[in-house]
């Protein structure tokens, strides 16, 4: 199990969650943030600090955003498991689901 970042983060990327993550498992894509499912330790520190309520425990992800679980997992098919977001910095791409979205109002 893991935490998932859903639609409210797209084009917002507040990054308060990054500051709270004790294991550096929240990676920055071009339009959204992503939680690495293998690096996340399920501590939940990220969830309450998200100002747009975009972070959910996998089992609590609202049905309308169920595809974001797959997007968070598949994003790392390209990235792999670098052992922390600090090693990669901001990445210049997103999962196709997020990349195809129209710009989100802020």
Image (cartoon, rainbow, N blue to C red):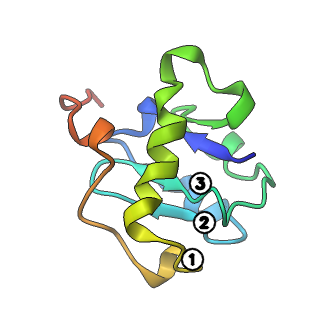
Determine which residue is flagged by label 3. Answer: 17
Q: CA distance from mark 2 to mark 3?
A: 10 Å
Give residue 52's position: percent from left, percent from top: 51, 33
Return the mark for residue 34: none
Q: Is residue 4 left or right of residue 75?
A: right
As rendered, which of 5 and 15 lies closer to the eye?
5
Determine which residue is flagged by label 2. Answer: 25
As rendered, which of 38 and 14 lies closer to the eye?
38
Q: Secondary structure at mark 3?
A: helix
Q: Secondary structure at mark 1?
A: loop
Which residue lies at the image location 66% right of the left edge and 63% below the top edge?
Answer: 38
Which residue lies at the image location 47% right of the left edge and 84% below the top edge?
Answer: 87
Which residue sits furthest front? 77
Determine which residue is flagged by label 1. Answer: 84
Q: CA distance from mark 3 to mark 1?
A: 14 Å
Give residue 106's position: percent from left, percent from top: 30, 31
- Above-or-below relation of 100 to 72: above
Which residue sits furthest bottom? 87
Which residue sits furthest right? 43
């Amino acid at each position: 199990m893991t935490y998932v970042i859903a639609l409210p983060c797209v084009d917002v990327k507040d990054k308060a969650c990054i500051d709270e993550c004790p294991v550096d498992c929240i990676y920055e894509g071009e339009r959204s943030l992503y939680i690495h499912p293998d690096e996340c330790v399920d501590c939940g520190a990220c969830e309450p600090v998200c100002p747009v309520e975009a972070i959910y425990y996998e089992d609590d992800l609202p049905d309308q955003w169920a595809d974001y679980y797959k997007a968070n997992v598949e994003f790392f098919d390209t990235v792999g498991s670098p052992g922390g977001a600090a090693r990669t910095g901001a990445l210049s791409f997103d999962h196709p689901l997020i990349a195809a979205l129209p710009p989100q109002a802020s």
